[in-house]
């Protein structure tokens, strides 16, 4: 069963595969053109987006697409422990850090979401 939240940069199962397949189906990727380079760097982002090739979990970890690689059966327990450790922090500070982090990169992301391909 895929767990989207578990691969939102925090952790991935050793069995996970990743790809940006927008180009394959002729759909403009929108925010991906901003978010992906910020996560993995421009060279990897271009290769991932322009090739549509799949990456294995070890490669995703090595390039910074995910922070942790865990055994498949440990994915849910690991992400639940991580979520619990965040939940134990002062709520106001977590909210402020998330808000400020979102604002620090959000303007470029909104611009990308509104852009149109040539």
Image (cartoon, helix red, strand yellow):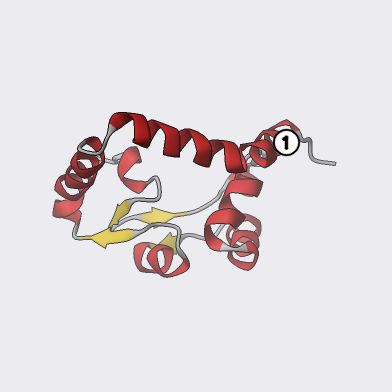
Viewed as shown, does residue 82 lie left or right of 25?
left
Q: Residue at x 31, y 54 (%)?
A: 12
> Which element is circle 1 on?
helix
74 and 79: which one is in front? 79
Residue 89 spot, x, y in % from top left: 25, 39
Res 113 seen here: yes
Q: Quadrant of the C terminus?
A: top right
Q: Residue at x 60, y 59 (%)?
A: 45
Q: Quadrant of the N terminus?
A: top left
Q: Residue at x 40, y 50 (%)?
A: 9
Residue 22 spot, x, y in % from top left: 61, 44
Report the number of numbered marks.
1
Viewed as shown, does residue 69 lie left or right of 23?
left
8 and 52: which one is in front? 8
**Toward which corner of the image does residue 44 lie, by quadrant?**
bottom right
Neighbor class of circle 1 (other Cα within 10 Å; few <14, some 14-19, many 20+) is few
Relative height, residue 61 to residue 101 (above, below): below
User: Farthest residue toward the right?
Assistant: 118
Q: Residue at x 64, y 39 (%)?
A: 109
Residue 34 spot, x, y in % from top left: 64, 47
Res 14 seen here: no
Residue 52 spot, x, y in % from top left: 58, 56
**Toward which corner of the image does residue 41 lie, by quadrant?**
bottom right
Q: Return the residue at label 1.
A: 111
């Amino acid at each position: 069963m895929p767990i989207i939240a578990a691969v939102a940069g925090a952790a991935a199962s050793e069995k996970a595969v990743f790809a940006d397949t927008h180009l394959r189906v002729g759909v403009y990727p929108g925010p991906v053109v901003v978010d992906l380079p910020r996560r993995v760097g421009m060279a990897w982002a271009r290769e991932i987006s322009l090739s549509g090739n799949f990456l294995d979990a070890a490669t995703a970890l090595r390039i910074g697409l995910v922070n942790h690689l865990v055994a498949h059966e440990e994915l849910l327990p690991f992400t639940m422990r991580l979520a619990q450790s965040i939940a134990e922090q002062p709520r106001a500070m977590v909210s402020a850090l998330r808000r400020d982090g979102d604002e620090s990169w959000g303007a470029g992301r909104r611009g990308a979401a509104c852009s149109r391909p040539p």
